[in-house]
């Protein structure tokens, strides 16, 4: 208080207080190029190359350039999707492990120049660079160090080729913001026809220091990505999740690209890491990095994408979201629909910073003039609250004039001076009392907490421990509207139905008579037993808002069913769990339904694994009343099941049956027939 008064006194005293020196930096600290990169947060990855046309994830290098032939390539569509959905740049797979180059390179004939695309006159790296420029996006390149096509891979001569490829990319296409090197290196390949296994010493083969020096010289502002950085590191998994504790500090010299124990030991960073090498979370919007038509229905859902957002950007990591561009050369409409939902929800979640409503703000302690709590609330990341040197704790307290509903807290350290905070707590003021609300460990560039919603009179951020006096550049509070998606429906084998809300606190109303549900329909409280066939319709409701309706036919329960055919895990076919499979010993599934029923059809859910085997293509369906004499009631083909492995519903003329038999006449890959679920249609 005395200090405050002194600072308000006339000029003489103000000068006597003097400007306060900023806190001393705590090593390691980011370079300028890293600081510029940190602000990007969210950018696009595009996997588009030879694998797109061979329907593979890793080509062998033996592919023919003639196979590369997009029919309707529009890189401006990619750039529009990036720009309109908040991504700040695009990184393109200029060369993946199969060695095919998307630009006309002088180093190999395994390139676009020898493909039908624009009769060999095309240069997709150039097209993407220009589209980025046009749409105000930054541009980056992925150049795979592993090259399964090149005859010299494994020898010194290849290193020269690799560097020359890099030189071409870094000199011919304007500014590059990130150069991306993956850690998958060495193994079997075509290698100019040798078709052999070539292992390399990942630590020494590439002589990375020389390559890095070249990048620094040609593109001084580009960050270099790799397991070990040097500027940006891999988050250690492909789900897009950083860690509850994520340091930007890394023991960089203990790591090399592709080291087996990297993910487990190093990917979360280390408090005492020697270099600033922040995490980047790379994840694909579909299961694969490359486009496969059979994944069109597997684009990540909004809740999955939101988890990725909050667990990457919300945990001190950037987010590199991959779009597997299709054989037309376009981002598929399903992927666009999902990323649009994500960006709209993010906008909605962070629309209004509730700090605007704060009546009273106070820091328990501060370094002095220019480092008060208001510097953490002014929306300017260049100014920050700081505790005095040597002080490792501190509280920032915000109080509202009226109670306010809050469910998101965003906090950012002033990282130019190093990452400091090790532990913090969040408290809420409710009915005049401070109560525990949440807690965390690291903050770093940005930390976002999804809190249980509370109506609060105040919020306190208590820094509990830090490497050095904490600094906070931004503290913000939000009330994200509830995620209002139609409820999901799960059913057990004996017919118990569970309705799952998209978020805690959302209510569900449902009907079983085919009518449209509304606020006067039945409120879902606990699982319901549905024993006879019905159509269930359900909606989610929050604050008077209603979601779209989920509609699902629920046929007779499978509780009394018995699988009579043999093979691996027969019960998996009738357990109502789409993720478990039955592999038949003789290509057929025979089921005793327990009772005689009137059957109007059957359903077959193919294996849902990322790599499917034994999916039935042509089938024969038969019924029996005694399990001995069978009557074939349908035969045919599950059309398009390879590309769209969703539930197949086949109707038959009504028939009496106690036993059913689905026989695989052929499977997609000639492997033993597999079944995720078999069901009946009686409704
Ligand atoms: C990995 C590669 O092996 C994958 O194919 C993909 O490109 C991913 C982003 O990086 O290392």
Image (cartoon, rainbow, N blue to C red):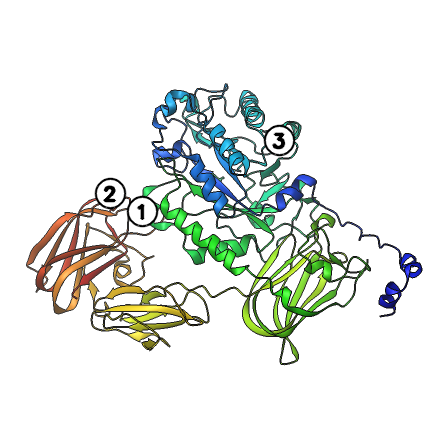
- Determine whether the beta carbon of the residue marked 3 sits less than 8 angstroms from the nearest atom of ligand 1: no
Mark 3–mark 2 CB contact (< 8 Å) = no
How far, Cα to Cα, is label 1 from label 3? 39 Å
- Tell me if residue 367 comes above or below residue 258 in the rendering: below
Q: Is residue 497 left or right of residue 37?
A: left
The secondary element bearing badge 3 is classed as helix
What percent of the width, then of the height, locates residue 231?
Answer: 64, 40
Per the rendering, the mark at residue 208 is: 3
Badge 3 or badge 2: first in the primary sequence:
3
How far, Cα to Cα, is label 3 from label 2? 44 Å
How far, Cα to Cα, is label 1 from label 2? 9 Å
How packed is label 1: few (under 14 Cα within 10 Å), some, or many (20 or more)? some
- Tell me if residue 275 comes above or below residue 453 in the rendering: above
Which residue is identified by label 1? 612
How packed is label 2: few (under 14 Cα within 10 Å), some, or many (20 or more)? some
- Which is more toward the observer, 336 or 47? 336
Q: Is residue 330 left or right of residue 238?
A: left
Locate the C terminus by quadrant: bottom left
The secondary element bearing badge 2 is classed as loop
């Amino acid at each position: 208080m005395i200090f405050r008064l002194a600072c308000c006194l006339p000029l003489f005293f103000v000068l006597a207080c003097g400007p306060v020196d900023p806190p001393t930096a705590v090593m390691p600290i980011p370079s300028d190029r890293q600081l510029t990169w940190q602000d990007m947060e969210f950018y696009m990855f595009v996997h588009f190359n030879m694998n797109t046309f061979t329907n593979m994830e890793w080509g062998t290098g033996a592919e023919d350039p003639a196979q590369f032939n997009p029919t309707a390539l529009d890189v401006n569509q990619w750039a529009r999707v990036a720009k309109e959905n908040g991504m700040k740049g695009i990184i393109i797979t200029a060369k993946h492990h199969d060695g095919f180059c998307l630009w006309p390179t002088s180093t190999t004939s395994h390139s676009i120049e020898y493909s039908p695309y624009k009769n060999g006159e095309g240069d997709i790296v150039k097209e993407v660079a220009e589209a980025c420029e046009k749409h105000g996006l930054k541009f980056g390149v992925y150049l795979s160090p592993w090259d399964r096509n090149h005859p010299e891979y494994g020898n010194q001569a290849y290193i020269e080729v690799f560097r020359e490829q890099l030189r071409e990319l870094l000199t011919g296409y304007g500014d590059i913001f990130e150069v991306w090197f993956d850690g998958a290196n060495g193994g079997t390949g075509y290698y100019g026809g040798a078709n052999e296994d070539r292992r390399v010493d990942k630590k020494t083969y590439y002589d990375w220091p020389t390559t890095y020096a070249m990048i620094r010289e040609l593109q001084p502002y580009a960050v270099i990505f790799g397991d070990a950085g040097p500027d940006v590191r891999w988050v250690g998994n492909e789900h897009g999740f950083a860690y509850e504790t994520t340091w930007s500090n890394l023991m960089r010299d203990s790591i090399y690209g592709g080291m087996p124990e990297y993910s487990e030991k190093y990917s979360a960073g280390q408090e005492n890491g020697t270099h600033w090498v922040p995490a980047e979370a790379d994840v694909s919007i579909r299961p694969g990095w490359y486009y496969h038509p059979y994944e069109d229905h597997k684009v990540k859902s909004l809740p999955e994408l939101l988890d990725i957002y909050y667990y990457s950007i919300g945990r001190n990591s950037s987010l590199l979201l991959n779009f597997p561009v299709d054989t037309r050369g376009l981002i598929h409409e399903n992927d666009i629909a999902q990323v649009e939902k994500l960006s709209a929800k993010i906008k909605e979640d962070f629309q209004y910073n509730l700090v605007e409503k704060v009546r009273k703000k106070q820091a328990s302690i501060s370094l002095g003039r220019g480092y008060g709590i208001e510097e953490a609330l002014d929306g300017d990341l260049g100014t920050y609250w700081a505790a005095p040197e040597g002080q490792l704790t501190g509280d920032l307290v915000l109080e509202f004039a009226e109670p306010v509903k809050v469910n998101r807290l965003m906090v950012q350290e002033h990282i130019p001076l190093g990452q400091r905070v090790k532990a913090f707590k969040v408290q809420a003021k409710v009915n005049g009392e401070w109560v525990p609300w949440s807690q965390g460990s690291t903050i770093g560039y940005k930390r976002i907490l999804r809190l249980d919603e509370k109506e609060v009179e105040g919020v306190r951020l208590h820094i509990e421990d830090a490497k050095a006096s904490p600094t906070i550049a931004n503290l913000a509070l939000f009330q994200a509207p509830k995620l209002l998606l139609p409820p999901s429906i799960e059913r057990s084998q004996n017919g118990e139905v569970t309705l799952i809300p998209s978020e805690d606190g959302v209510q569900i109303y449902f009907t079983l008579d085919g009518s449209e549900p509304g606020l006067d329909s039945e409120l879902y409280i606990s699982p319901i037993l549905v024993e006879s066939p019905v159509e269930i319709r359900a909606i989610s409701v929050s604050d008077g808002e209603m979601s779209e309706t989920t509609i699902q036919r629920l046929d007779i329960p499978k509780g009394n069913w018995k699988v009579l055919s043999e093979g691996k895990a027969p019960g998996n076919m009738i357990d109502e769990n789409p993720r478990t499979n039955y592999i038949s010993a003789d290509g057929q599934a025979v089921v005793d339904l327990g009772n005689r029923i009137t059957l109007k059809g059957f359903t077959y859910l193919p294996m849902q694994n990322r790599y499917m085997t034994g999916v039935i293509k042509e089938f024969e369906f038969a019924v029996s009343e005694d399990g001995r004499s069978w009557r074939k009631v349908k035969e045919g083909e599950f059309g398009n099941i390879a590309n769209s492995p969703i539930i197949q519903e086949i109707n038959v003329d009504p028939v009496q049956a106690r036993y059913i038999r689905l026989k695989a006449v052929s499977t997609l890959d000639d492997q033993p027939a597999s079944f995720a679920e078999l069901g009946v249609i009686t409704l």
